[in-house]
Image (cartoon, helix red, strand yellow):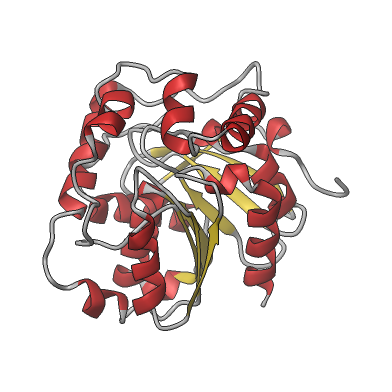
Amino acid sequence: MTNTLELVEAELQHVQGANGVSYAYRRLGRVNQGVPLVFLQHFRGDIDNWDPALVDPIAAERDVILFDNAGIGASTGVVPSTVAEMAEGAISFIEALGFAQVDLFGFSLGGFVAQAIALSRPAIARRLVLAGTGPQGAAGLGAWSQDVADRLVLKVQPGGEDLLYVFYAHTPSSQGAGQASLGRIFQRQSGRDTGVSLAAKDAQYEAIVAWGEPDGQVAQRLATIAQPTLILQGDNDIMIPTEASRTLAEYIPNARITVFADASHGSIFQYAPEAADQTVAFLAD
């Protein structure tokens, strides 16, 4: 990769937000060139749960920033129990770095946060990439099915077999792609982020359940998202129903969607080169 820093080489940095939180982040790629792309992570994920096969090709073209929101990983503070408060935390981080506007890549819970930012502070979000996620109040976004909850919510520390079960389709090709992705994610051997505590996990899940409460306002709310939006999803996501992503595409006025075949929640890692290419092209469009 020319004139860029790969994810495994990017050092952990910190910046103090106006809210008193010290945010941990890694910055890589074409730093200070164009609008930065801020990544918002999934449930129980920290900075180092991003797949380099997705991040590095994007960073070859973009200024990429991965961070831990309040109470996650190496960041200080307490994880809030609402998505709206998580969005405020992300905005505090963005402003602490001095950005007036960014692009957002939100994965799963991070996609909830990206939507909340777009709705509460539309001027700060130029474009959205929403992966493996769905809108507030959509069917199936509340408490997860028992098999998913058993593996990702109730376990003290989910293992590789749990991640493969939830994030990848139960086929040899998808499971093989998942094993390869996990190998890349754990490529960093030293200086890794510090993970997600059980208290942080519980607060995140409380926020997820509340986000999924039906309120009859899905279409009206999404219609007010003015940002161009790219939606990426697997065709059989057992964590965030694929139909919820189709709802995003239906009601966000300027949205497009790609549904990857033979894929579940981790489609952006299973199809990392394709997801990266689509993201780069979309942000440059």
User: Does residue 74 appear in the picture of this structure?
Assistant: no
- Rendering quarter of residue 7: top right
Q: Residue at x 63, y 71 (%)?
A: 282
Instruction: Tell how many labels.
Output: 0
Q: Residue at x 19, y 48 (%)?
A: 142
Q: Residue at x 46, y 33 (%)?
A: 46
Q: Is residue 28 above or below residue 279?
A: above
> In the orientation shown, which residue stands out farthest toward the right?
2
Q: Residue at x 30, y 33 (%)?
A: 148
Closest to the observer: 267 or 209?
A: 267
Residue 242 rendering spot, x and y as whole percentages: 39, 56
> Left or right: 206 with respect to 3?
left
> Left or right: 110 with respect to 25?
left
Q: Is residue 212 above or below residue 183?
A: below
> Left or right: 2 with respect to 33?
right
User: Does residue 228 appear in the picture of this structure?
Assistant: yes
Location of the N terminus by quadrant is top right
> In the orientation shown, which residue stands out farthest toward the front?
171
Closest to the observer: 285 or 31?
A: 285
Residue 32 rendering spot, x and y as whole percentages: 69, 59
